Image (tube, rainbow, N blue to C red):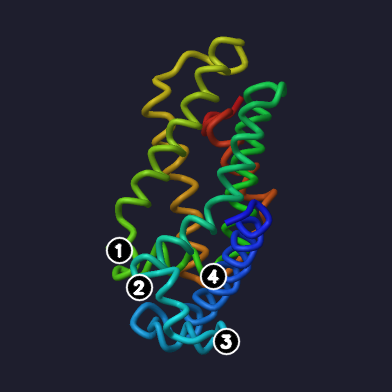
């Protein structure tokens, strides 16, 4: 196979997988996990069922692909913030805003990831990996802030758990209430609580 042929094949594969991603999201949104079948996805994507099996062997593989693709922009944005030269408190604020913004824009999809026990079970390994990465990202920012005297000295591992837990609970509450709260407001609430606490100053 020539380089041109290889490039064309990769482009076709990319387009097909993008179409399948959108189809899976549509089917999940309308029918939930129980209604996610290869037949429905193939029909939604406008491809034959046999073509679908060229890319995914089963439902779990499709879910893993959709989960990875949904998380990818968040991960990329967070890494950009981490590598920037801005102070640690601004990095933390930017990361929180990125999380809240992306989760708000893809509320239905993340509702399935977080609150559908069937989906959660199939993606348990992926969810744990992403959680560990998020906790490490927060911890890195906190450690940087302590070194630069932006933050006081704290147990960064436990504080990371507290911040991550606050973000997750706020997101899950929105999903449970089928509401979307303002991104900037959520970001500032979390930043204010963890930077100033509850005491009157």
In the displayed structure, 163 sits above or below 68; it is above
Q: Say which label, 1 or 3, has the lower sequence index.
A: 3
Q: What secondary structure is found at the residue carrying circle 3?
A: loop
Of marks 1 and 2, the one in the foreground: 2
Q: Which residue is mark 2?
A: 59
Cα gap from disc 3 to disc 2, whole angstroms: 18 Å
Are the residues at dot 1 and dot 2 in contact (C-beta closer than 8 Å)?
yes
Total marks in image: 4
Q: Which residue is mark 3?
A: 46
Cα gap from disc 1 to disc 3, whole angstroms: 26 Å
Of marks 3 and 2, the one in the foreground: 3
Q: Which mark is residue 122?
A: 1
Q: Say which label, 2 or 4, has the lower sequence index.
A: 4
Q: What secondary structure is found at the residue carrying circle 2?
A: helix
In the displayed structure, 9 sits above or below 2; it is below
Q: Say which label, 1 or 2, has the lower sequence index.
A: 2
Q: Residues within 10 Å of mark 3 (few under 14, many from 20)?
A: few
Q: Residues within 10 Å of mark 1 (few under 14, many from 20)?
A: some
């Amino acid at each position: 196979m020539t380089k041109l042929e290889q490039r064309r094949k990769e482009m076709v594969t990319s387009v097909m997988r993008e179409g399948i991603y959108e189809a899976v999201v549509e089917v999940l949104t309308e029918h939930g996990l129980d209604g996610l079948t290869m037949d429905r996805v193939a029909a939604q994507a406008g491809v034959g069922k046999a073509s679908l099996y060229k890319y995914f062997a089963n439902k779990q593989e499709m879910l893993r692909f959709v989960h990875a693709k949904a998380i990818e922009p968040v991960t990329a944005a967070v890494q950009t913030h981490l590598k920037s030269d801005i102070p640690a408190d601004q990095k933390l604020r930017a990361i929180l805003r990125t999380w809240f913004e992306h989760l708000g824009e893809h509320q239905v999809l993340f509702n399935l990831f977080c609150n559908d026990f069937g989906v959660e079970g199939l993606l348990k390994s992926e969810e744990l990996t992403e959680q560990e990465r998020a906790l490490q990202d927060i911890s890195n920012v906190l450690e940087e802030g302590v070194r630069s005297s932006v933050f006081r000295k704290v147990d960064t591992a436990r504080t990371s758990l507290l911040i991550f837990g606050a973000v997750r609970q706020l997101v899950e509450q929105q999903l449970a209430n089928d509401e979307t709260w303002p991104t900037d407001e959520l970001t500032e609430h979390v930043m204010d609580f963890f930077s100033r606490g509850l005491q009157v100053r």
